[in-house]
Image (cartoon, rainbow, N blue to C red):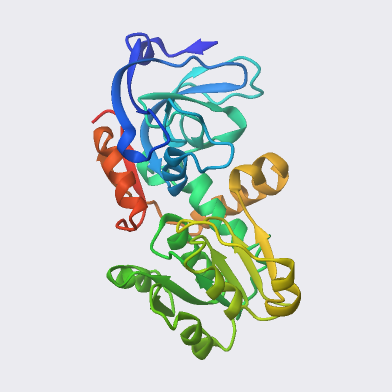
Amino acid sequence: MEINEQQHSAEQTVRALVQRSHQGPEDLTLTTDRRCPTPGPGEYLIRVGAAGVNFADVMQTRGTYGAGPQAPYVAGFEAAGEIVGIGSDIESPLELGTHVIGAGPGAFAQYMTMLAPDVLPVPSGWSDAAALGLVLNWATALAALRPLGEIKTGEVVLVHAAAGGVGQAAVRLARHYGARVIATASPAKHDTVKGLGADDVLDSARPDLADEITRLTGGVDLVLESVGQATFEVSLSVTKPFTGRVVVFGAASGDATVTTHDLVFTHQVQVKGLHIGALAAAAPSLFQSLLIEIEALIAHGVYPPGTPQVHPLAEGPAVLQQLEAGQTCGKHALDPWR
């Protein structure tokens, strides 16, 4: 194992946010006595520069995230930072000092480990915080639109929760691929979403949402569904029969259900499930193709550096509570050194 002694040896314990129960973000506690992790075979040790906040973090605090960690645990799973340690059994390892973006357990801390295949170098000239979202938000949006959503020029795409991290990426990407974009968000976030290129932005809580979408479009070709219970029936009802696709990658408002009877007699649409971590594990070549496409999008300026709102680590519980309540806009991040 190779360690950057100058940056790591003095850090015997680390600051971290530990989830004490499955009662929600209010039981997320700042600690200063966690032992610094050690990279195992196939892992890098990362000095975290910025950790991404995602709705999956909220779900984990409630114990509702599939195969999520059991409390107590160091929270967070997305981060960017500097490689300061290299475990064994890594083919062609990146050099110490390389800044990378990736995912792994325990991101809400000053140090964490990541599996080597799960990291990408931070794009040249970008800060750690600017790279957050690359392997999660943007990869999810791209997977939902391209290999799963099969987006085509001129199609109509409905993006729910369009002001969130995945939603904003999806609006940008759908416009880039030539789609007409109908977006939903709370009224305070409409200007943000409109600025990303959405053709129409609707209040996600309006009672006639389905009727208005149908009036505007005559039927939607592709829906990106991450809200769940509050919007799922709308998504099914506005999607074109047989040719329309609904890609489901979240349930922020709670689980929704669809029955075989629904799919045969009421909503004859294609429903596809997406979890980007599961996709990376089950179809690694497909995931790698997404990352290659994202690198091309960065090179062509379609994917600009991110501008997340960065908070001190101690504010993590409050940020997650705001995210759970739908009070955030765009990407949020934590700085474990503040």
Q: Nearer the viewer, residue 35 or 294?
A: 35
Q: Position of residue 210 (x, y in %)?
A: 50, 81
Q: Residue at x 27, y 69 (%)?
A: 188
Give the vertical position of 146 relative to 45 (above or below).
below
Q: Quadrant of residue 52?
A: top left
Q: Quadrant location of the N terminus?
A: top right
Depth check, front residue: 189 or 69: 69
Residue nearer the viewer, 314 or 112? 314
Q: Position of residue 136 (x, y in %)?
A: 51, 47
The image quadrant of residue 50 is top left
Q: Examine the rendering and report whether any part of residue 98 can be seen.
A: yes
- Residue 187 image offset from top left, x and y in percent: 30, 73
Taking the image as shown, residue 127 lies to the left or right of residue 175, namely: left
* Side of 23 where 276 appears, left or right: right
Residue under the image location 25 percent in, 38 percent down: 315
User: Is residue 187 placed above or below 165 in the rendered structure?
Assistant: below
- Residue 81: percent from left, percent from top: 41, 31
Instruction: Report the quarter where the C terminus lies.
Output: top left
